[in-house]
Amino acid sequence: MWKTSDMKLPVTAYKLPVGKKLRGVSTKLRAGSRKLRAGSRKLRAGYVLMEIVIALGLFSAVAVSLVKALHMTSETAATIQDRMRIDRILRSAMTDALSNPNLEEGSETFDLTEITGDEESFFTGQIETIIEPMELENEDGQLLQNMFRIEVIFYWQAEGGWQEQSAETWRYGNLYQP
């Protein structure tokens, strides 16, 4: 029996002559290629339009995301600036309370415009300073006399309601006495 692997057939490469027309085949190929080219132009034009629509969609999504990120960044920066202003107001009021040589028990409330003198300030509110005596003992159990707790509270109106922030410290009453 014959095996197909034993059979070797000669392989001959045929080349069509360039520039010469074959009978019947050449004209059919040309007519078909024209139809193919006209169809591929329409198809290609559809792909270009689709590419433009996709590119515009991606660009708009990135632009919207960027605008949202910038808006959030500006809101965060404004919040940080507001908190820094409040912190400065509290530090200033605390420094004033601590520098008083004679501490007396009591509470004082000031309008912020009285302290700053600026009636067109960004913040309007009140500052309350509370001074009250404390009873503290040292490690040996001895009572420390003339100790005061000083609390400064800033009240302001924001976001549709009253807000407050406070700072607190302790001070020895005779600290600035000779």
Image (cartoon, rainbow, N blue to C red):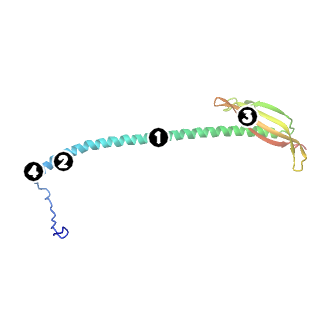
Residue that appears at 43% across and 42% down: 59
Q: Of the numbered discs in the image, which one, if any, rests on residue 169? A: none
Give neighbour class at mark 1: few <14, some 14-19, many 20+ (Cα, 10 Å): few
Q: Which residue in the rendered view is the most extreme toward the left?
A: 23
Q: Secondary structure at mark 4?
A: loop
Amino acid at the residue labelled 4? Gly
- Horizontal side, residue 93 vs residue 177: left or right: left
Which quadrant, please, contains the N terminus?
bottom left
- For residue 119, what is the image quadrant? top right
Amino acid at the residue labelled 2? Ser
Q: Of the numbered discs in the image, which one, if any, rests on residue 33? A: 2
Q: Earlier in the sequence, mark 2 or mark 4?
A: 4
Q: Secondary structure at mark 3?
A: strand
Residue that appears at 80% across and 31% down: 108
Amino acid at the residue labelled 1? Ala
Amino acid at the residue labelled 3? Phe
Residue situated in front as seen by the camera: 131 or 138? 138
Q: Earlier in the sequence, mark 1 or mark 2?
A: 2
Q: Which residue in the rendered view is the most extreme toward the front?
A: 1
Q: Earlier in the sequence, mark 3 or mark 4?
A: 4
Q: Which residue is mark 4?
A: 24
Q: Which residue is mark 3?
A: 154
Give neighbour class at mark 3: few <14, some 14-19, many 20+ (Cα, 10 Å): many
* Pair 2/3: label in front: 2
Residue that appears at 83% across and 43% down: 171
Q: Which residue is mark 1?
A: 63
The residues bearing labels 1 and 2 have C-alpha atoms spaced at a distance of 44 Å
